[in-house]
Amino acid sequence: MRAPASVRRWPQTPRPTGYTLLFSPPAPIVVTEHFPQKMDYVPARDFRPVAVGVLQPAVLVVRPTLGVKSVDEFIAYAKNNPGKVQFGVQGLGGEMHLSLELFKKTAGFSVNPVTYNAAAHAIVDLLGDRLDAMFLVVPPIKGHLDTGKLLALATLNPTRTRALPRVPTMAELGRPEMTGTIWFGYLAPAKTPQMAIDRLAWAFQRLQDDSDLRNRVADLGAELNIIGPEEFAKLIERDRARYGKIVTEGNLAATQN
């Protein structure tokens, strides 16, 4: 006989053991909380950093037919054509959106943001001259950059990326405030035992010595860069503060209501 609903016991959530991990980009961990939408988790409370696995350099990309070949030329074009530049944004409230808001504010120009649910659709529009520019990570567009179908003006990476050695960083161009890292990292439930975290971190660190894996990731336009729990935690806090400042100073949370 089934117990009445009022006394029925539901299965409890299993105790975290380190066998279940979240693989995430920055937005759900350091960006989303700064906006008013309801979240059923609190990143700082509910997750423990384990390791960053991959860094994906982001670049400012334009269609070649736009006629600009540098960041300064792009800014000048946007200023001379206020609100006319069609700038792709993959998801409002994400790290790429906030990078665009910071870029507009610090460089003093306006664009017409065009939102996309998936980068693949935006890339098709860039290639078809229906979109002018966008911040994108390198892997999905590397082939188009190599063939000249798309043009990378600058990377947001702290240093030049191996995949695009001739593309300058924003910092090199006098815009250090645009420097940001798009990481993909592993996080565990908050109550995962320290022993499990340590063992996972050790296992991930061994991947750094796999030259074949490192070269394969580099060929795709990303970087195998294993960062352990302590440094990953510091990276999360830096990014949380950085993106929070952009949201606050731009009053962006109010515009997303």
Image: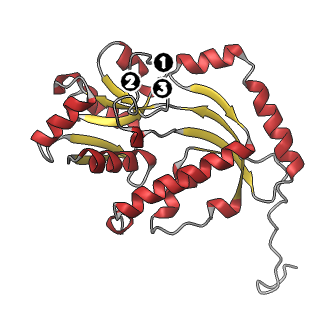
Q: Please name the amino acid that badge 2 sits on.
A: Pro
Quarter of the C terminus within the rendering:
bottom left
In the rendered image, the vertical position of residue 211 relative to residue 131, given as above or below: above
The disc at residue 210 is: none
- Image position, residue 92 (x, y; %): 38, 53
Q: Is mark 2 on a helix, strand or loop?
A: loop
Q: What residue type is labelled 3?
A: Pro
Location of residue 68 (image quadrant): top left
- Answer few, some or many: residues within 10 Å of disc 1's Cα (few below 14, many 20 plus, some between 14 and 19): some
Closer to the observer: label 1 or label 2?
2
Position in image of residue 201 (x %, y %): 79, 38
Q: Quick one: label 3, few (<14), some, or many (20+) residues within 10 Å?
A: some
- Looking at the image, the residue that sits furthest to the left is 80
> Mark 3 highlights which residue?
139
User: Is 49 displayed left or right of 182 in the figure?
Assistant: right
Q: Is mark 1 on a helix, strand or loop?
A: loop
Decide: few, some or many residues near mark 2? Use Cα within 10 Å; few <14, some 14-19, many ≥20: many
The residue nearer to you, when weighing 210 against 121, is: 210
**Considering the image in quadrants, where does the N terminus appear?**
bottom right
| Residue 141 picture quarter | top left
Distance of label 1 from label 2 (alpha carbons): 12 Å
Mark-to-mark CA distance, 1 and 3 = 9 Å
Left/right of residue 224 with respect to residue 109 in the rendered view = right
Q: Residue at x 21, y 33 (%)?
A: 74
Q: In the rendered view, does 57 fall on the left or right side of 76?
A: right
Label number found at residue 168: 2
Residue found 45% across the figure and 69% down from its top: 36
Q: Taking 106 as reference, is 171 above or below it?
A: above
Q: In this view, does 172 lie to the left or right of 149?
A: right
Q: Is residue 22 visible?
A: no
Where does label 1 land, which residue?
Answer: 163
